[in-house]
Amino acid sequence: MKKAATQTSNDLRPENQKVKLNLIPYKEEICLVEFLNRGSAGMFQKEADWAYGESCLHTMVSNFRQHGILFDRKPNPITHRHGGKATYTRYRLLDDVSIERAIFRVNKLRSQRGLEPLKGLPPYSIYSQAA
């Protein structure tokens, strides 16, 4: 099995103290950046699946509560391809405090991967800023 792509930073620290860059973002990080980029539109399960392959958006949203990141929830009825109705929950970051906490969490996860924090509001896609 192949190892994940890593890259050593170019700094003057001794070899045993150099940080390895992990270019593969955490799923939690991808989810939060997607919410930040979508702004007040938020997203529901199908959009999360299309965007980054999320299969349990409700679980991710629930897990963010432990970091103080709260979400507004609204029913989102859709008509499926056979004409029937289905209702998904549309989630969006609740307020400015939750947005700030989401940015803080993303930057913490990026620092764990050896990357610089995102700059600006809203943060740009993590794919364009990786290494």
Image (tube, rainbow, N blue to C red):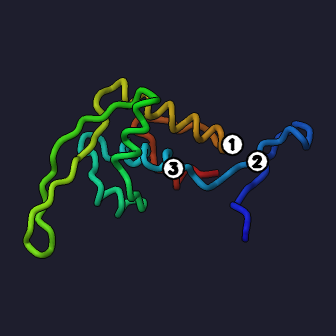
Q: Is residue 122 above or below residue 98?
A: below
Residue at image mark 3: 126
User: Is residue 72 found left or right of 26 in the rendered image?
Assistant: left
Residue at image mark 2: 20
Which quarter of the picture shows residue 33?
top left
Please tell me whether mark 3 sits on a helix, a strand or a loop.
helix
**First in residue order: circle 3 vs circle 2:** 2
- Circle 1 packing at 10 Å, graded few (<14), some (14-19), many (20+), is many
Cβ atoms under marks 2 and 1 closer than 8 Å: yes
The three-letter code of the residue at mark 3 reads Ile
Q: Which mark is residue 19?
A: none
- Cα gap from disc 1 to disc 3, whole angstroms: 13 Å
- Cα gap from disc 2 to disc 1, whole angstroms: 6 Å
**First in residue order: circle 1 vs circle 3:** 1
The three-letter code of the residue at mark 2 reads Lys
- Residue 1: percent from left, percent from top: 73, 71
Residue at image mark 1: 114
The three-letter code of the residue at mark 1 reads Gly
Measuring 55% from the left and 36% from the top, which residue is drawn there?
107
**Which circle, 3 or 2, is nearer the viewer?**
2
User: Is residue 105 found left or right of 20 in the rendered image?
Assistant: left
- Circle 2 packing at 10 Å, graded few (<14), some (14-19), many (20+), is some
User: Is residue 121 found left or right of 25 in the rendered image?
Assistant: left
